Image: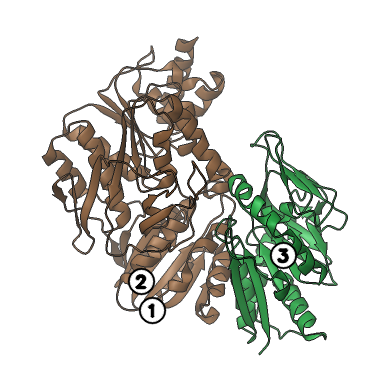
Amino acid sequence: MSTIKILHMYADMLDLYGDSGNMEVLSYRCRMRGIECVIDKYSIDSPMPDFSSYDLIYIGGGADLEQQHISADLLKCREGIAKAYKEGVFLFLICGGYQLMGRYYRDADGNDIPGLGLFDYFTVAPNSRRKRCIGNIVIRTQLTGKAVDVVGFENHGGQTQGVKTPFGKVLYGNGNCSKSEAEGYTEKNVIATYLHGPCLSKNPEISDYMIEYCLSRSSGGKVQLQKLDDTLENQCRKVMLDRLLK
Amino acid sequence: MKRLQIIIGKIIVKLLHLMKRNAGNLPGIVLWHISRHKAVSMFKVDCPIIAVTGTNGKTSVTNCIAQLFERSGKKIITNREGNNLDTGICSLLLRHCDMKGRVKADYLILETDESHVPVVYSQLKLDTLIVLDFFRDQLDRNGEMETLIQKINGFCKTFKGNLILNGDDPNTARLGKANPGNKNVKYFHAEPYAFATKTIYEASEGRFCPFCGEPLEYSYYQYSHIGKFRCPKCGFGDYEPYITASGIDLTKPVFTADGHTYAPKLNSIYNVYNMTAVAAAAKLYGIEQNITDSVISAYTVKNGRMENFMLGDRKTTLNLAKNPVGANMTLRVMNEMEGEKELLFVLNDNVADGLDVSWIWDINFSIFERVTRVVTAGTRAHDIAVRIKCSGYDQSKIVVRPDLDKAVEELASTPGRKFVIANYTAVQPTRAALKRYIAKNGGRTE
């Protein structure tokens, strides 16, 4: 039996808007195919893990207060995460997790929370806490090799700038900045996005892209995933696409 | 000018009545705008005002406290219909004031939306503020919960009146430290009930001490993050309770508070907390014990909150769940019940629900016991279906029927016990659909 090892970081602190649901979706889609999915948790004060021993590292989003709590701890992990990323470990980052991998996050009071600087982008929160990008969002990504419309919900104050390779093009909603054209950040082994919902709940292609990537990387060859019955997920997405894009 | 605005408001109330329309919010909205958001300050209120706020339980506690005073022979004004925003409160006062804006009553008892506490009570003198709990609820409308707590905390910094707080919710208990000069802070507390746990059971917030950032230590959790907590570093959570519920037995159901045993009608730990808050208010205002007794023991609800229906001969319980905590509680009640059952989950994403439905992923469906089939309905019927499927529930037992009448028919098409969970804007349409089914096919409402 093949296995995927996931490290879910700060699950107890960065878990707004059902982000832990992404882990449930991934493990569900593995389980249905007889793939073992091991999810380890890491949080403040856990012993330093061997990041490179994982196939995928996941960080969700949190409120400002929680984000401040974890940023110092996350910096301690910088070396390990950077090494794992360079070796091809998949990074799946939502909202706060996305922001903290950039150069810095400047909060509403003008204080800089340093990021890991893995990527060049940076995020600035508007002065007013009331100015947030909130609502349903649809983006079109080419990550899997063909166009996939991804539906989610965004809720962020921070405006992320300096992204060269976005996750998708915004068809409905805001994206990285208010009314922007691009959403998230991506590389072949990185998905960083503002999409909650949770992100994977009605976008099975994205889950499968990650599972396929992880299995192919660990086996050294191209792995074809067994098809699943995604009728419910596809209907769910269609309802929202019809409502938002028509 | 003030007088003119009040007259305009009163005319609108009258017109709406003539048109046989409910004057719940509209007059207040108009007044709010013409007075540039100072509408509430136009009223002259000399009697004590008691406000009830929090995520869950506001309506129940407000109604019970209103009854305490009513049965004591006092003239009260209260927003029973739950119009709890600034504009709703403004409409209520408009209906009850004279042409000079004077409001005559012995007590005002006002359910108040969490985010509207500061704006309303910076304009009206508040005698007592009761804060029940803070849970994730409609996050996208209110912004993050911390912002909300900060808002109320800011209000509490200068508030010198009575502050009755749930001492078992760190999110509300922290308000007791906002104004160190206020000697009128009172905490209510409950001892563990039979289903209290040593570890946390449902997704929740407030895991860290708001004062020093240390993880809070719990000796028990009642549900979600409600329980006996303490900060090991700064001692936050050490307080002398004003009133404590003990001897909680939900099978009867009974509990004891302040040496007196109550036998409420509703058998949830929720209700024990709510009624303990009511008992705290009764103690503070010196309500006679027999009156408190009659209010607490008679209180029951009919607004889709654990409301029973008979669909033909199938017993059906409907419960409102606006957030994961409410939904998890219903699932627990469902599980604790013997035998097989079916669930209808109605999920809407209208503005009042909060447009974001991701909160359903914080509901712990993996605890399902003896649930033989699930029907889903509402504007986000598919989302809740996917959510339940990914918890490991067999997808062939999930039926999606966005239309409510079709969903109720589907639910009633098989024999056995039924449960219905509906979120905020779904609950009234669901009740209506259940009643339509009963009118057509027989059964009864209880």
* Chain letter for the part of the structure drawn in green: A
Write the residue at 77% across / 49% down: A176
The one of A115 and B139 positioned closer to us in this rendering: A115
In which chain is the residue bearing label 1?
Answer: B
Q: Is residue B198 visible?
A: yes
What secondary structure is marked by label 2? helix
Q: Quadrant of the C terminus of chain B?
A: bottom left
Res A138 quadrant in image = bottom right
Label 2 crowd (10 A; few <14 / some 14-19 / many >=20): some
Under mark 2, the amino acid is Asn
In which chain is the residue bearing label 3?
Answer: A
Under mark 3, the amino acid is Phe
Compared to residue B146, the image places residue B226 above or below, namely below
Earlier sequence position, callout 2 versus callout 1: 2
**What label does residue A92 carry, if any?**
3
Q: Are marks 2 and 1 in contact (CB under 8 Å)?
A: yes
Q: Nearer the viewer, mark 3 or mark 2?
A: 3
Q: CA distance from mark 3 to mark 1?
A: 36 Å
Write the residue at 31% across / 68% down: B442
Q: Position of residue B287 (x, y in %)?
A: 17, 34
In which chain is the residue bearing label 2?
Answer: B
Q: CA distance from mark 2 to mark 1?
A: 8 Å
Q: Position of residue B235 (x, y in %)?
A: 40, 44
**What label does residue B321 carry, if any?**
none
The one of B88 and A152 positioned closer to us in this rendering: A152
**Which residue is disc 1 drawn over?**
B370
Under mark 1, the amino acid is Arg
Callouts 3 and 1 in the same chain: no
* Chain letter for the part of the structure drawn in brown: B
**What label does residue B335 carry, if any?**
2
Q: Are marks 3 and 2 in contact (CB under 8 Å)?
A: no
